[in-house]
């Protein structure tokens, strides 16, 4: 069985080598959808009986590991020195460095890796993160899918 939880956050970014508008500093209202799989809990009296996992538990993990650190932050390519140096000069500014340009594709892959570890810590092998979808806009998204 697969279930999906969606959350939203706001963040800025830029794609430094992009041939069009995305090379400029700008922001998005991102959405993240996390799809997990597992067996439906059948233990009589268990608070998750009839569920794969409680949606609020999924929300808490995604919020803690992705939304809270990325929300209202600037998602920056660590090699984009002019921007990173500028952001570091702003007291208290939240900058999240990435090892590649912060495209929807790279954000989805990064979130998948982070959440695989978070869910393994919380659920062991009972729940598996299958896919992370990052919406950069309502019409544009990237899917990172778990591979064997």
Image (cartoon, rainbow, N blue to C red):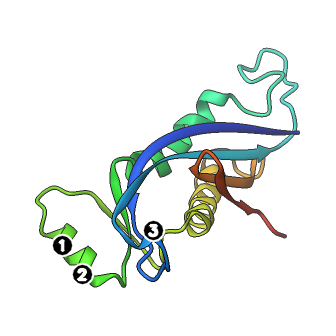
Secondary structure at numbered mark 2: helix
* 69 sits left or right of 52 in the view: left
* Neighbour tally class for label 3: few under 14, some 14-19, many 20 plus, Cα within 10 Å: some
Mark 1 → mark 3, Cα distance in angstroms:
18 Å
Which residue does the image show at 74% across and 46% down from the upper left? 35
Q: Position of residue 12 (x, y in %)?
A: 37, 57
Q: Residues within 10 Å of mark 1 (few under 14, many from 20)?
A: few
Which residue does the numbered mark 2 point to in the structure image?
82
63 over 104 or under it: above or below: above
Task: Tell me where residue 120 appears, x and y as whole percent.
Answer: 66, 54
Of the numbered discs in the image, which one, if any, rests on residue 86? 1
Which residue does the image show at 75% across and 45% down from the upper left? 36
Residue that numbered label 3 is attached to: 22
From this view, report whether residue 48 is shown above or below residue 77.
above
Q: Quadrant of the C terminus?
A: bottom right
Residue 58 at what x, y percent from top left?
62, 37
**In this view of the protein, which residue sits in the foreground, 80 or 35?**
80
Q: Is residue 128 positioned above or below 98 on the image?
A: above
Pick the residue in front: 51 or 47. 51
Occupied quadrant, residue 46 = top right
Q: Is residue 139 rendered to the left or right of residue 114?
A: right
Q: Dot 3: what SS? A: helix
**How far apart are the alpha carbons under marks 1 and 2?**
6 Å
At horizontal 67% and vertical 53% (from top left) the residue drawn is 133
Q: Secondary structure at mark 1?
A: helix
């Amino acid at each position: 069985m697969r279930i999906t939880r969606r959350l939203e956050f706001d963040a800025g970014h830029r794609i430094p080598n992009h041939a069009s508008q995305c090379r400029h500093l700008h922001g998005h209202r991102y959405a993240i959808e996390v799809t997990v799989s597992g067996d439906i809990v059948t233990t009589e009296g268990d608070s998750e009986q009839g569920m794969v996992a409680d949606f609020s538990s999924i929300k808490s993990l995604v919020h803690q590991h992705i939304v809270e650190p990325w929300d209202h932050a600037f998602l920056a390519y660590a090699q984009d020195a002019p921007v990173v140096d500028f952001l570091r000069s702003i007291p208290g500014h939240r900058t999240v460095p990435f090892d590649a340009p912060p495209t929807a594709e790279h954000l989805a892959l990064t979130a998948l890796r982070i959440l695989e570890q978070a869910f393994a810590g919380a659920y062991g092998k009972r729940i598996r993160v299958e896919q992370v979808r990052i919406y950069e806009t309502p019409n544009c998204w990237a899917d990172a899918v778990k591979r064997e």
